[in-house]
Image (spheres, helix red, strand yellow):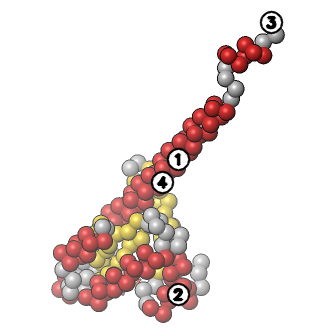
Amino acid sequence: MFPSETRVDFKMKTIEVDGIKVRIQIWDTAGQERYQTITKQYYRRAQGIFLVYDISSERSYQHIMKWVSDVDEYAPEGVQKILIGNKADEEQKRQVGREQGQQLAKEYGMDFYETSACTNLNIKESFTRLTELVLQAHRKELEGLRTRASNELALTELEEEEGKPEGPANSSKTCWC
Ligand SMILES: Nc1nc2c(ncn2[C@@H]2O[C@H](COP(=O)(O)OP(=O)(O)OP(=O)(O)O)[C@@H](O)[C@H]2O)c(=O)[nH]1
């Protein structure tokens, strides 16, 4: 539970990705400028981030660039990002074309979905995709660590081996028989 003035909502959800049950923590930070000092602190522990604009608001779309720069500044380096154009059910009020969303996502190297919280359009898909990306990144990081650890182990063994007195020749010197 958070006091209302923190302007951050928190939920837990379990979703299945590649046959694996993954429990995810969802933090919904306030968009307004005046809460930014607080909400930026939540970026630090994020593994995946949705950057969300409203397809019926050109202004919210223009704001995405600022969000991206904040994420680059405050979120961990390997954080996974997806661009979302929400309120896709509001077609008659649309101010941002789907191609504009696609173009922006391409520029930033992100996946892109148009969603609707009202009709559930692409909600599950986008959460599943972001979870997949986070898991992939996590696996890569683990593989990297494993490779580094085994390289270091091999190096230590080699150094120990090189430091040892020579086998048969040496043993003949110390042989008492
Ligand atoms: N038509 C439609 N309305 C939506 C959709 N998603 C949210 N809304 C409405 O948009 C308004 C704002 O929704 P919020 O979830 O408070 O948006 P927010 O970006 O979290 O707002 P802040 O926390 O103030 O930054 C509410 O009235 C919602 O009912 C959607 O997909 N379609």
Of the numbered discs 4 and 3, the one sitting upstream in the chain is 4
Q: Amino acid at mark 4?
A: Glu
Q: Residue at x 67, y 20 (%)?
A: 167
Give the number of the disc on residue 37: 2
Spatial CA distance of label 1 from label 2 is 37 Å
Packing grade of label 1 (10 A; few <14, some 14-19, many >=20) is few
User: Which residue lies under the disc numbered 3?
Assistant: 177
Dots 4 and 1: beta carbons under 8 Å? no
Q: Residue at x 45, y 64 (%)?
A: 78
Q: Residue at x 29, y 90 (%)?
A: 59
Spatial CA distance of label 4 from label 3 is 55 Å
Of the numbered discs 3 and 2, the one sitting upstream in the chain is 2
Q: Amino acid at mark 3?
A: Cys
Q: Decide if residue 174 is on the left or right side of residue 99.
A: right
Residue 116 showing in the rendered view: no
Q: Vertical placement of 117 versus 5: above or below?
A: above
Q: Amino acid at mark 1?
A: Arg
Foreground disc of the pair 4, 2: 4
Q: Vertical placement of 166 versus 70: above or below?
A: above
User: Which residue lies under the disc numbered 4?
Assistant: 141
Packing grade of label 4 (10 A; few <14, some 14-19, many >=20) is few
Spatial CA distance of label 4 from label 1 is 11 Å
Q: Residue at x 38, y 69 (%)?
A: 81
SS at badge 1: helix
Along the viewing direction, whichever of 73 and 16 lies nearer the viewer: 73
Of the numbered discs 4 and 2, the one sitting upstream in the chain is 2
Residue 100 showing in the rendered view: yes
User: Which residue lies under the disc numbered 1?
Assistant: 148
Dots 4 and 3: beta carbons under 8 Å? no
